[in-house]
Image: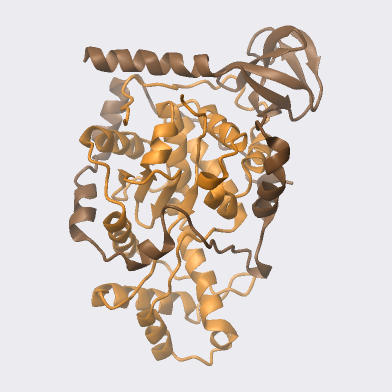
Chain colours: A orange, B brown
Amino acid sequence: MTRFLLAVVVVVLVTACAGPGQSPQFGDLLGAELGKALGPAGTGGDGIPLAGTVSDADEQALGREIAGRLLAAYPLVRNDAVQRYVNQVGRYVAAQGPRPGLNWTFGVIQNDDINAFAAPGGYIFVTRGLYRMLGSEAELAGVLGHEMVHINERHYVRLLQQQRILALGQEFLLGRVKNATVQQLAGNGVELYARSLDKDAEFACDRLGIQYAARAGYDPFAYLAVLDRLGADTHADQLALLYKTHPHPAARLDALETLIGSRWDGLGGKVDAGRWVRLD
Amino acid sequence: MKRIRTMVVALLAWPAACLAEPATMSKADNLYDKPFADARVVGRLTAGQAVDIQKREGAWYQLKAGGKLGWARMLSVRRTAPAAAASAGSVAQVATGRAGTGRIVATTGVRGLGEEVLQEAAFSEAAVAAAERFRVDAADAERLARAQGLAPRQIPPLPVPAAGAGGGAP
């Protein structure tokens, strides 16, 4: 029996670990990035220091480190056809967003939770559990689109900033902690696992992700149907993380309803593109 | 190839077969005879009314409601949880949870993709390189998409909600 349990768990997995096995290069990268973020460059309206510009190369190096850890624990599903397929769809949808030049890398990983991960620089992984519950390319495009927004909008940078604030405390904000200390903290590891973003970030991912999918020619409502199915699902075990890290699907649909209204009544678009790869 | 075709056909048929699901009107809306806003109105649906979803076409669900068959905007409809009453409390609690003023919520007790497992995982060059081998060039991706009848299109951006408005959420 096919369950209509569906999902878009979007966890921006930001792991900036610098443990014993950490390469010096990565530690340096993070330290440098911390310095930029916490330098005297000014603060946002809420008093949180704003990050300096992080280059695409820095982002990719950070994301690659994260991806390499995730994949070490949960390797790619051994199915070349499905891996090629998600890259073909993902890369095409990414081209409709603001950062088409990133080295976008997509994959389906060996895990049966319903989950998806985005790491800086263009790494996006969906679990086998999530992939199996999707029913069309338009649904896949919407899910990947949501993840892409986390990367395109550099949400993880903000997350790192907030985490730093928690880790370093008021001392740092007042400028009492010297840069050497920052380096040391970076060396000890600023660990962020499966933390949720500001809820507004998730709404933004829904809003922008469906626009990437729509611009790619897909029916964007396929993604809303995914949210709708998810909202009616009661498999709490597989969805616990989703509900901890995201607004409830009903709230997300309400938000989208406000924005879409009747604008896309006649938009249409492809649901199936005739190349779906089934994953048994 | 034949097998693939069979699977595609099966997948195309699958959503239609699985629909006819119970749902509830999240707001009042018209029931139209076709999936267009300028179609003939054949009924009026009230907020909270129970309906049955038959299928979806773009922005529209075909519904059975009060003995009538018609179409309504899918965003006026929400699928009904089989045990809504039982799960609503816990879901609502976690869905609205926020930690302090930082508006950042840490997830603990991550299931499946375990926090501990990830913390202990050492970077694997081989694993990430294996994933990167599947990268597709942008031009190739578009060529392949076009071969399936897809094409990029211009769509005016959706409005951007006011900051902090939660994207229009309650």
- Closer to the camera in the image, B18 or B152: B18
Q: Quadrant of residue B135?
A: top left
Image position of A118 with respect to A176: above or below: above
Decide if residue B144 is on the left or right side of residue B47.
Answer: left
Decide if residue A272 is on the left or right side of residue B65.
Answer: left
- Closer to the camera in the image, B125 or B19: B19
- Closer to the camera in the image, B71 or A82: A82
Q: Name the residue rendered at 22%, 40% in the picture.
A: A78
Image position of A269 with respect to A76: above or below: above
Q: Say whether residue B149 is visible.
A: yes
**Percent of width and height locating residue A56:** 33, 59
Image position of A100 with respect to A79: above or below: below
Q: Quadrant of residue B115?
A: bottom left
**Percent of width and height locating residue A184:** 38, 86
Decide if residue A35 is on the left or right side of residue B134.
Answer: right
Q: Say whether residue A96 is visible.
A: no
Image position of B38 with respect to A223: above or below: above
**Percent of width and height locating residue B138:** 28, 39
Q: Name the residue rendered at 60%, 23% in the picture.
A: B59
Quadrant placement of the C terminus of chain A: top left
Q: Name the residue rendered at 27%, 46% in the picture.
A: A76
- All told, the count of numbered labels is 0
**Percent of width and height locating residue A274:** 33, 19
Q: Name the residue rendered at 31%, 27% in the picture.
A: A277
Decide if residue B24 is on the left or right side of residue B136.
Answer: right
